[in-house]
């Protein structure tokens, strides 16, 4: 069974460190004050799920959550799960954060 996850932030805990935006460029952007704007669309593929979990572990205050969603497709999805372009973990700096 393929697993997909969605990412969310507890705004009461978040302190705006921005680590999540660095690790999940395709799902987290920062607002003008440095707080995360999270795209909660489910992520699938082992690489994306791994990155989401790593970002949650890296949050210094435990404000980033990764919630699993079971799918009934029985496959690993169609995206292949490989690192996307622009992923710094794959050695591609991709887009830059707003300053
Ligand atoms: S890493 Fe944690 S504290 Fe920092 S912006 Fe993301 S959710 Fe907030």
Image (spheres, rainbow, N blue to C red):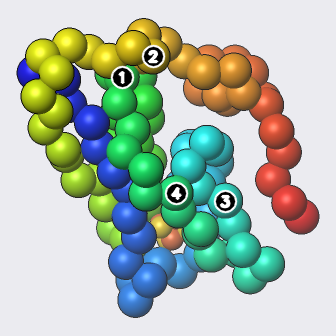
Residue 64, relative to residue 93: is it above or below? below
- 4 and 2 marks in contact (CB < 8 Å): no
**Mark closest to the chain's N terminus, 2 or 1:** 1
Dot 1 falls on a residue whose secondary structure is loop
- 3 and 2 marks in contact (CB < 8 Å): no
Q: Residue at x 39, y 38 (%)?
A: 43
In the image, 50: left or right of 55? Answer: left
**Mark closest to the chain's N terminus, 4 or 1:** 4
Q: Nearer the viewer, mark 2 or mark 1?
A: 2
Q: Residues within 10 Å of mark 1 (few under 14, many from 20)?
A: many
Q: Residues within 10 Å of mark 2 (few under 14, many from 20)?
A: few
In the image, 16: left or right of 58? Answer: right
Dot 3 falls on a residue whose secondary structure is strand
Q: Residues within 10 Å of mark 3 (few under 14, many from 20)?
A: many
Q: Nearer the viewer, mark 3 or mark 2?
A: 2
Residue 37 percent across, percent down from the top left: 59, 68
Dot 2 falls on a residue whose secondary structure is loop
**Mark closest to the chain's N terminus, 1 or 3:** 3
Mark 4–mark 1 distance (CA, rounded to whole Å): 16 Å
Q: To which residue does mark 1 refer? A: 45
The tag on residue 29 is 3
The answer to whether one can see residue 19 in this image is no
The tag on residue 79 is 2
The tag on residue 60 is none
Quadrant of the drawing holding the N terminus: top left
* Residue toward you, 62 or 97: 97
Q: To which residue does mark 4 refer? A: 39
Q: Residue at x 44, y 83 (%)?
A: 11
């Amino acid at each position: 069974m393929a697993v997909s996850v969605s990412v969310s932030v507890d705004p009461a805990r978040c302190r705006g460190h921005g680590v999540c935006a660095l690790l999940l460029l395709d799902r987290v952007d920062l607002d003008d004050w440095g707080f995360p704007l999270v795209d909660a669309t489910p992520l699938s593929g082992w690489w994306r799920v791994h990155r989401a979990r790593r970002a949650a572990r890296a949050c210094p205050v435990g404000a980033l959550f990764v919630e699993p969603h079971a799918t009934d497709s029985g496959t690993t999805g169609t995206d292949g799960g490989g690192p996307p372009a622009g992923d710094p973990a794959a050695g591609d700096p991709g887009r830059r954060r707003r300053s």
